[in-house]
Amino acid sequence: MSEKARKLFKALDLNDDGTLTREEVITALRTKGPTLAAQGDLPFWGLGDADASSALFDAADQDGDSVLTFEEFAREVDRRFGW
């Protein structure tokens, strides 16, 4: 799993509990996404609306428990973003 995925996960984990909810992903990408992209921590093309963020969450949530662990998240963003 990439260090970029770890850094992005930490930035999106708004309540710092070690997991991501759909709302955290949507909210954090909307509020922090442009800054993360400008810093090189998220591809600019990875920014999207709530539907795109929700689709990213759904693709990563392999066990269907509506919570992303770092491993689930990293597997999807490493694949999707080519990290």
Image (cartoon, rainbow, N blue to C red):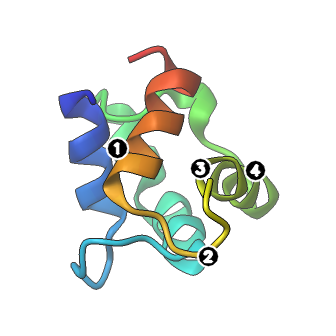
- The residue beneath circle 2 is 66
Foreground: disc 3 or disc 4? 3
Closer-to-camera residue (43/4): 4
How many residues crowd around disc 2 within 10 Å: few (fewer than 14), some, or many (20 or more)? some
Q: Please say if the residues under marks 1 and 2 sit with CB atoms less than 8 Å apart.
A: no
- The residue beneath circle 1 is 36
Report, in whole angstroms, how far the alpha carbon at label 3 lies from the one at label 2: 10 Å
Against 62, residue 31 (above or below) is below
Report, in whole angstroms, how far the alpha carbon at label 2 lies from the one at label 4: 16 Å
Q: Earlier in the sequence, mark 3 or mark 1?
A: 1
Which quarter of the figure is the N terminus placed in? Answer: top left
State the residue at coordinates (58%, 25%).
80
Q: Earlier in the sequence, mark 1 or mark 4?
A: 1
Closer-to-camera residue (80/14): 80
Where is residue 51, by image quadrant?
bottom right
Q: Please say if the residues under marks 3 and 2 sit with CB atoms less than 8 Å apart.
A: no
- The residue beneath circle 4 is 52
Q: Three-letter amino acid code at disc 4?
A: Ala
Closer-to-camera residue (15/75): 75
State the residue at coordinates (43%, 70%).
20
Report, in whole angstroms, how far the alpha carbon at label 1 lies from the one at label 2: 24 Å
In the picture, measured across the screen, residue 19 lies left or right of residue 54, that is left
Q: Secondary structure at mark 1?
A: helix
Q: Please say if the residues under marks 3 and 4 sit with CB atoms less than 8 Å apart.
A: no
- The residue beneath circle 3 is 60
